[in-house]
Amino acid sequence: MKVSEFTCPFAHARQSKGLGFMDDQNDPVTMLLRLKDVRKTAHNWKTFQSGAVPGRIVIPSEVKIRDTRQIPFELDPPAHGDFRALLDPWFKRPLEDEYQHKLDNIIDNVIDKSTSLASLDIVTEFALILQSQALTLLLNTPFEESKTWISWGTHVFRSDGEALDANKANILYDYLDKEIDRAAENPTDDLYSVLLASEVNGKQLSKEEVKGILILTFAGGRDTVINAITNSIAYLADHPEALEQLKQNPDMINNAVEEFIRYFSPLTQMGRVVTTDTEVCEHAQKADTRVSLCWASANRDEKTFERADEIVLDRKINPHVGFGFSHHNCLGATHARQILRTLLLKLSQQVSAIEVIDYKENIEELGEFNRKVGFDNLRVVLHRA
């Protein structure tokens, strides 16, 4: 089996019943596996709620490690839309020329350093560094701050051998409290300061609301972006012809990015809390129980995607839900897409081949399913073109 092959553990359950089940810290989850059901449920915010107890819609649940609501992620309309109206212009900045120029430089430097090494771990020595350095652009903070974020590792809520680590999470919370207080005393043009000076519906944002936005920014776009970068490089290592294809046809890169997101689905699922007794896929679902929108299964739905279990770099019709769906589509999707587009372009121009030396897969245990979501490590050689 190729290093970059990600088999779909949900296929049989998706085809036979459309549902899966898992226990999450004694708070069971009914997993929706078909694309049409995932999309329909994501759109029905009145029955399937995001604005539940902070941390409960995340799987694994983060109820035990935080009580700050992530905004706008854990809000429902109309409040969700009010905050999105404030945040969307800032999170669309990756489309600006100056932002892109700075991102180009970051990725050029990471590739330059990586190709000078005998070998490197793509997870910790490439993807983590690239994600952290690019985040300084999104937050408009000093580049040197990335060193602190790199020191936290690939996940801000988890440590080796533990699904959740409250002590590690507190490192992020304490850091954000300090930065918010710093911005309150000495405002700059960074995201902390901009948010503190902002209003929603005529009311100035509180420090707690600012913190909720920033927790989402740090946590939501960390391991997912790292997985997307790592898995894409694994594919190019397995398929050197694809690297050459992108070099000769850079117009394919946008389609390739969407296909990588569909196939690898860096985030497996996201939960919702049921507000009233209802039914999903002919299964009775009680109020105050949880369902999950299983993006990873929906993105392999053979009723929608031809050759669903293959990467088709130039796939034209690709209604994937790798960045979520409906009003809760990923706030950081523009930033993530720009990172991947730029990375694929520059790798195709500057790297002739990628050789895998060693790797360890990152497997999620999800009740009856075990899903490969990425790699704990992926040691490669990047051969300079």
Image (tube, helix red, strand yellow):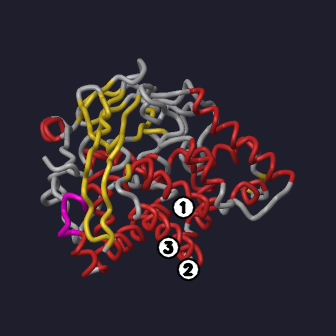
First reached walking from the N terminus: tag 1 or tag 3: 3
In the image, 180: left or right of 74? right
Q: Against 51, is 85 above or below?
A: below
Q: Is residue 201 visible?
A: no
Q: Secondary structure at mark 1?
A: helix
Amino acid type, label 1: Ala
The residue under the point 53% across, 44% down is 219
Disc sitting over residue 125 in the figure:
none
Cα distance in 3D space between marks 1 and 2: 15 Å
In the image, 377: left or right of 34? right
Q: Quarter of the image containing the C terminus?
A: bottom left
Task: Write down the quadrant of residue 323 in the picture.
Answer: bottom left
Total marks shown come to 3
Residue 241 shown in magenta: yes
The mark lying in front, picked from 1 and 2, is 1
Q: Against 45, is 370 above or below?
A: above
Residue that badge 2 annotates? 97
The residue under the point 12% across, 58% down is 307
Q: Residue furthest front?
A: 118
Amino acid type, label 3: Asp
Residue 125 shown in magenta: no
Q: Is residue 26 visible?
A: yes
First reached walking from the N terminus: tag 2 or tag 3: 2
Callout 1–callout 2 Cβ contact below 8 Å: no
Cα distance in 3D space between marks 1 and 3: 10 Å
| Residue 271 locus on image (x, y percent) | 42, 37
The residue under the point 74% across, 60% down is 194
The mark lying in front, picked from 2 and 3, is 3
Per the rendered image, the range of residues in magenta is 235-242
Residue that badge 3 annotates? 104
